[in-house]
């Protein structure tokens, strides 16, 4: 899966973000030379955490019918796919999940506020979870997409959430590589 038009994708992502709950401050924050230096340190850290994954093929899906002893599906969920060949182009993936510290840097840089907490969790508990710098950031899919789009802007590299196929392949995929 090779992205042929990354600039178009980035434009669409930015357009889509315009309708999200989290909006940038009406005045773009001015950043000092010291802030710019911190941004460059941040970018260097992000880049250093990337792992190159050589593209290739593997079999993805439910192996039960083809390889199982009883030749039955292992997974009966309706969204489970039958075994199929997937071909991926090369890509990079972070060694680590985005941390609270990294996500808070993004929010501060862009003049954004953390999301409003509603439901079963209290604001105090939410803030406590966000205080552990190296813990994974507590974000939803939309927030993660926005963060990735911003990473793409500040690093000049293509960033996005990994697809299920990319995630499985990078993890060694149970499927048969190169089959």
Image (tube, grey):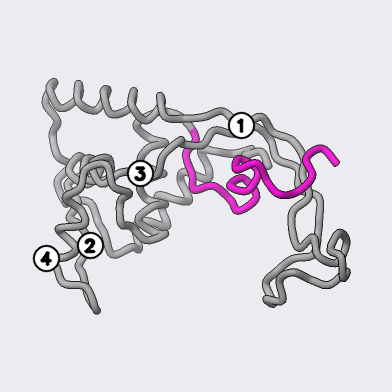
Distance between mark 4 and mark 2 Cα atoms = 13 Å
- Main SS class of the magenta portion in the image: loop
Residue 124, which numbered label? 4
Task: Report the quarter where the N terminus lies.
Answer: top right
Side of 100 relative to 29 (left or right): right
Q: Badge 3: few (under 14), some or many (20 or more) residues near its Cα, within 10 Å? A: some
Does dot 2 land on a helix, a strand or a loop?
loop
Q: How many discs mark residues in the rendered view?
A: 4
Residues rendered magenta in the picture? 158-179
Give the mark nearest the N terminus, 2 or 3. 3
Give the mark nearest the N terminus, 1 or 4. 1
Query: Residue placed at 35% from the left, 56% from the top?
Result: 143
Q: Quadrant of residue 124?
A: bottom left
User: Cβ–Cβ below 8 Å for labels 3 and 1?
Assistant: no
Q: Nearer the viewer, residue 31 or 46?
A: 46
Residue 159 on the magenta span: yes
User: Cβ–Cβ below 8 Å for labels 2 and 3?
Assistant: no
Residue 44 on the magenta span: no
Give the mark nearest the N terminus, 1 or 2. 1
* Residue 120 vertical position relative to residue 117 in the rendered view, above or below: below
Give coordinates of residue 54: x percent, y percent.
66, 29
User: Which mark lies nearer to you, 2 or 3?
Assistant: 3
Q: Badge 1: few (under 14), some or many (20 or more) residues near its Cα, within 10 Å? A: some
């Amino acid at each position: 899966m090779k992205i042929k038009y990354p600039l178009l994708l980035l434009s669409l992502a930015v357009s889509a973000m315009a309708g999200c709950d989290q909006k940038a401050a009406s005045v773009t924050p001015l950043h000092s030379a010291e802030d710019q230096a911190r941004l460059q340190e941040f970018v260097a850290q992000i880049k250093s955490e990337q792992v190159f994954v050589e593209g290739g093929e593997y079999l993805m899906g439910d192996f039960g019918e083809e390889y199982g002893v009883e030749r039955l599906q292992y997974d009966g969920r309706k969204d489970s796919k039958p075994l199929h060949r997937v071909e991926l182009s090369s890509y990079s993936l972070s060694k680590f999940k985005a941390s609270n510290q990294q996500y808070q840097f993004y929010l501060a840089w862009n003049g954004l506020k953390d999301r409003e907490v509603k439901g079963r969790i209290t604001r105090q508990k939410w803030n406590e979870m966000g205080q552990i710098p190296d813990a994974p950031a507590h974000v939803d899919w939309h927030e993660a997409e926005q963060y990735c789009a911003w990473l793409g802007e500040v690093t000049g590299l293509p960033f996005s959430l990994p697809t299920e196929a990319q995630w499985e392949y990078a993890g060694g995929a149970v499927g048969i590589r190169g089959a």
